[in-house]
Image (cartoon, helix red, strand yellow):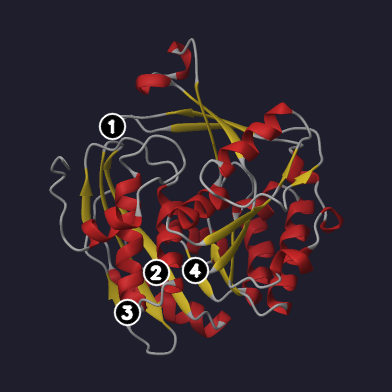
């Protein structure tokens, strides 16, 4: 199996139970997660050698975050113990027409103040096959943006393939700042993943007349921006998830991909996800599935189908991590969505 490195922030997630609003909650459910950590768990779960790189405080809460990763066979030997605190996010899970809400409490977290001196990137990327990061990490702080580029330089030095999930977070930075930072980082990227909002706000591309709330997906618009992105940054593949939000509990879910070498555009099958148990981490499970498919040697269409099926299943699981097996994903991707009891 392949060796994959992901780097980012792992956070303590405090979520209201039973779809309660914040004002109702007398207690919170505890989970750990974060964009790149979620991808690492997916890949480790599928049998790949996944290592997560981050910084956590040298205290019991930092140890709990590391233990959450070890539980699912993610490598943690390159996690630095430094900084003041672990970032926290509060989640109020929406239902029906009421959207989910996220409140961040992550200022001065360990990863936001970490520097390249806290990591041995040559050792980290020795023998690695793939490096994955997201647009969340450079958004956390200017120091984290510098750290991300240092990691990317080391990855390319070691001949490692690089993927990014653009993942725009308006509560962390503006579109103007995102474009200034992320456009520079695209020179290191081989596989670019993101939805229609990410493409516009992070890189400045808008996919035609797509309206995800009405379900009107103009696929020709995606093909057009993928062609532009490949022309501008020479990506090997451009990938986008396609979420149609009928409500917080009912989504249509599919994806599309464009190949630089074959100039083919492909749209996956679409899944109707209803009711949604937990959509947080859905995009990360998609990225992890696509990366797994490519590392397995699947053609890009099959890799996309694997990613879409993996993510559809993630929406049925509480918490950030996607804990389905490779067999479960392949069963769904093969057409069995019956949900029958397995005896």
The percent position of residue 325, horizontal first and vertical second, equals 35, 52
Which is more N-terminal, label 2 or label 4? 4
Q: How far is disc 3 from disc 2 in space, using C-alphas? A: 17 Å
Asked if the residue under mark 2 is in contact with the one under mark 1, i.e. CB atoms within 8 Å, the reply is no
- Residue ID for mark 2: 293
Measure the alpha-carbon separation of dots 1 and 3.
33 Å
Dot 4 or dot 3, earlier in sequence? 4
State yes or no: discs 3 and 2 in contact (Cβ < 8 Å): no
Q: Which residue is mark 3?
A: 265
Q: Secondary structure at mark 3?
A: strand
Front one among 168 and 19: 19
Q: Is residue 179 above or below residue 19?
A: below
Cα separation between marks 1 and 2: 34 Å
Picture quadrant where residue 33 is located: top right
Which residue is depicted at the point 34% across and 57% down?
A: 326
Q: Earlier in the sequence, mark 1 or mark 3?
A: 1
Disc sitting over residue 140 in the figure: none
Dot 1: within a 10 Å radius of its alpha carbon, few (fewer than 14), some, or many (20 or more) residues?
few
User: Can residue 170 be seen at all in this image of the molecule?
Assistant: yes
* Labels 4, 1: front one: 4
Q: Nearer the viewer, mark 4 or mark 3?
A: 4
SS type, badge 1: loop
Reading the image, the residue beneath label 4 is: 1
Specify which label sits upstream in the sequence, 3 or 2.
Answer: 3
Q: Position of residue 337 (x, y in %)?
A: 16, 51
Residue on which disc 1 sits: 97
Of tags 1 and 2, which is closer to the observer? Answer: 2
Question: Closer to the observer: label 1 or label 3?
Answer: 3
């Amino acid at each position: 199996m392949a060796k994959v490195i992901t780097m980012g922030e792992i956070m303590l997630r405090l979520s209201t139970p039973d779809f309660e609003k914040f004002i109702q909650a007398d207690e919170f459910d505890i989970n750990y997660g974060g964009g790149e950590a979620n991808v690492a768990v997916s890949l480790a779960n599928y049998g790949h050698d996944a290592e997560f790189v981050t910084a956590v405080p040298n205290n019991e809460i930092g140890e709990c975050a590391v233990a959450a990763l070890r539980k699912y066979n993610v490598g943690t030997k390159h996690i630095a113990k430094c900084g003041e605190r672990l970032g926290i996010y509060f989640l109020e899970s929406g239902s029906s027409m009421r959207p989910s809400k996220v409140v961040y409490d992550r200022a001065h977290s360990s990863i936001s103040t970490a520097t390249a001196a806290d990591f041995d990137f040559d050792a980290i990327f020795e023998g690695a096959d793939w490096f994955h990061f997201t647009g969340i990490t450079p958004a956390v702080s200017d120091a984290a943006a510098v750290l991300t580029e240092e990691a990317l330089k080391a990855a390319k030095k070691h001949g490692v393939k690089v993927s990014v999930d653009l993942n725009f977070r308006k509560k962390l930075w503006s579109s103007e700042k995102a474009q200034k930072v992320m456009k520079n980082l695209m020179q290191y990227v081989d596989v670019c993943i993101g939805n229609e909002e990410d493409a516009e706000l992070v890189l400045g591309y808008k996919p035609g007349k797509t309206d995800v709330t009405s379900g009107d997906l103009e696929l020709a618009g995606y093909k057009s921006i993928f062609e532009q992105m490949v022309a501008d940054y020479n990506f090997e593949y451009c990938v986008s998830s396609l979420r149609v939000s009928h409500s917080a509990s009912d989504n249509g879910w599919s994806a599309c991909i464009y190949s630089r070498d074959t100039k083919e555009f492909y749209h996956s099958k679409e899944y109707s996800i209803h009711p949604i148990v937990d959509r947080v981490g859905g995009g990360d499970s998609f990225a992890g599935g696509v990366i797994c498919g490519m590392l397995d040697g699947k053609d890009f269409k099959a890799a996309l189908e694997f990613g879409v099926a993996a993510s559809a299943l993630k929406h049925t699981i509480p918490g950030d991590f996607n804990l389905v097996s490779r067999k479960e994903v392949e069963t769904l991707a093969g057409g069995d969505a019956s949900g029958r009891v397995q005896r």
